[in-house]
Image (cartoon, helix red, strand yellow):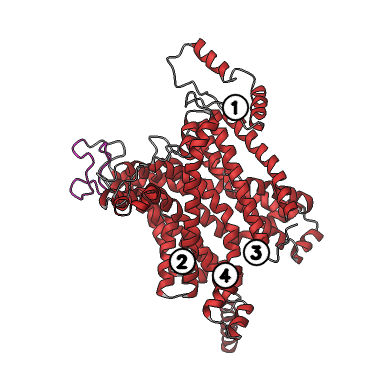
Amino acid sequence: MALLAAQRNAHEALMADAAAIKGRSLWEDAGRRFRANKAAMAGVIVLGLITLCAIVAPSLSPHTIDDLDWMNIGAPPSLENGHWFGTDDTGKDMFVLTWMGARVSLIIGVMTTAVALSIGVIYGATAGYVGGRTDNAMMRFVDVLYALPLLFFIIILVTVFGRNIYLVFLAIGCVEWLTMARIVRGQTLSVKQKEFIEAARASGAGPAAIIGRHVLPNVVGPVIVYVTLLVPTNILVESYLSFLGLGVKEPLTSWGVLISRGANSIESAPWLLLIPATCLAITMFCFNFIGDGLRDALDPKDR
Amino acid sequence: MTSYALRRLIIAAPTLFMIVTLSFFMMHLAPGGPFDAEASLEPEVIANLEAAYDLDKPIIVQYGFYLGKVARGDFGPSIIYIDRTVTELLVIGLPVSIKLGLSAMILALAVGGSLGVIAALRRNSLTDYAVMGVAMTGIAVPSFVMAPLMSLLFGVVLKILPVASLEPRGGLAEALPMLAPITPYILPVVALALPQIAILARLTRGAMIETLRQNYIRTARAKGLGQRNVVWTHALKSASLPVISYLGPAAASILTGSVVIEQIFQLPGMGRFFIQGAINRDYPLVLGIVVVYALAVILLNLIVDLMYGLLDPKVKVE
């Protein structure tokens, strides 16, 4: 009886060992490399904090976004009157404005990227998978669009159809999908030569199933890297539009709107420019560090 | 080579046609018109105005008229700048924008390229980290933040350069009268070039590091060539290829960046006319500028591709 128990224990210990030495998947490897990258991890943490601030900070302030504090117009940052980031030239609290702007800027960055991602992935995967003449025609079309000063189209769209926030999502997203399509197409072309695609086709899977179940999961790496770089690009595009007076409308605000207003009073009230600009720059740094970290973690060349 | 260039120019025609068509219908199909703002106008006056600009005709007829005129190089009269044709406005705006953009491009290439090469040669040294740190900042801080900060520092605090004016004022113009005519352009050009300097520095550094790892560089070193010779005659040419292929997109971003910079520094370039025109629905002005911009981007891309073909023996341009 004791012998049997000992045998079972030994067997369990063996199984535990086997579990401990199970192979590392590509994603575990990448995760380990990413966590070892200090700049990228710092980027993740700081970006997390900024997102948290954007969600909760406006309600922590004693002021709200509509408060006009007549006693403190254009006041510099101070702890005593509760205007931690100062006030603007109408007496609005900059702390609340900055984090409300953060909400809009971050949401725009994410939503526009989602639009670009959907169009780019579908377009690129189709072109790459179908190949041949269709691929040629589809990619020529992308080349033609690439040659255009697309920001001008965004400006025309926004001025002509009104400065609606959903339109800003769509306009930026519809313009920024080109590189995504190229990346996905290139990856798809190389993946579709692999044996497992042939196996899937041999077992009777249709094109849609092959693209969705077998091709796309294998092109995720470069797409993730590009997404982390596209989000900050799109936040910048929105700021650029806002700076020209073509971004989101009152009562919404964004970092671009705040920067543009701050730039006008830079001599009398520099904090109106510096605070939103610093937030924007820190966010850009975070995304770029994370993107670089992901690229190093996922790039098979350096393995 | 010549036939390739010609073929590319011929392909440019349908591209341009697509751009004109797309922007024309985008502007004209939207609700509202250029005379909405003037609420005090009598309906008859508006009707007369619309007739004068052909806006009362069916859109397809307007489109036909417009294509015919553009084909003859006539962009029509501007609506907001009364008594000016779009061509006249382009003649005012284009030289300013070209000066600005070209100088920014040259500055970005010279500074960004040298910084990248220096960083690559001293890889993982303090110099490298400093250059890459500056480059990162250049990418993270947009030009419309840099520009006001630079104006404040050099124009208002130090009083070296003029701010938002084409008059040569400030300390530098007085100290060196020779340089006076270019002083109004220094701040805008630098502000416009900064993001491109940053990107080009990163790009050049990467390309240079990659090239210096190649076997033929090891061979060059092994046969006893000095560092200068290896870098200048052997590495630089191959390392410049990725940089050259970025010049097309770089030119496009300088063009769009120029819109904001002209706005900030109050320069009478194409970008300001474009924004004014777009906000006020000045159809002919906006379309004219889009055509010129698109033409510029197409031509620049062609030049870049031709340069690429000349430099890269792997690419055969036929």
Q: The disc numbered 1 marks a residue on which chain?
A: B
Sequence-first disc among 4 and 3:
4
Q: Residue at x 63, y 32 (%)?
A: B73
Q: CA distance from mark 4 to mark 3?
A: 11 Å
Sequence-first disc among 2 and 1:
1
Question: What residue is pinned by disc 3?
Answer: B311
Quarter the N terminus of chain A occupies: bottom right
Q: Residue at x 63, y 46 (%)?
A: B298
Three-letter amino acid code at disc 4?
Leu
Farthest residue, direction bottom: A3
x then y, percent, for residue B215? 63, 79
Residue A15 lies in quadrant: bottom right
Three-letter amino acid code at disc 1?
Leu
x then y, percent, for residue B240? 58, 65
Q: Residue at x 49, y 23 (%)?
A: B83
Q: Which residues are magenta?
A: A70-92
Labelled disc at residue B115: 2
Mark 4: which secondary structure?
A: helix
Question: What residue is pinned by disc 4?
Answer: B236
Cβ–Cβ below 8 Å for labels 1 and 4?
no
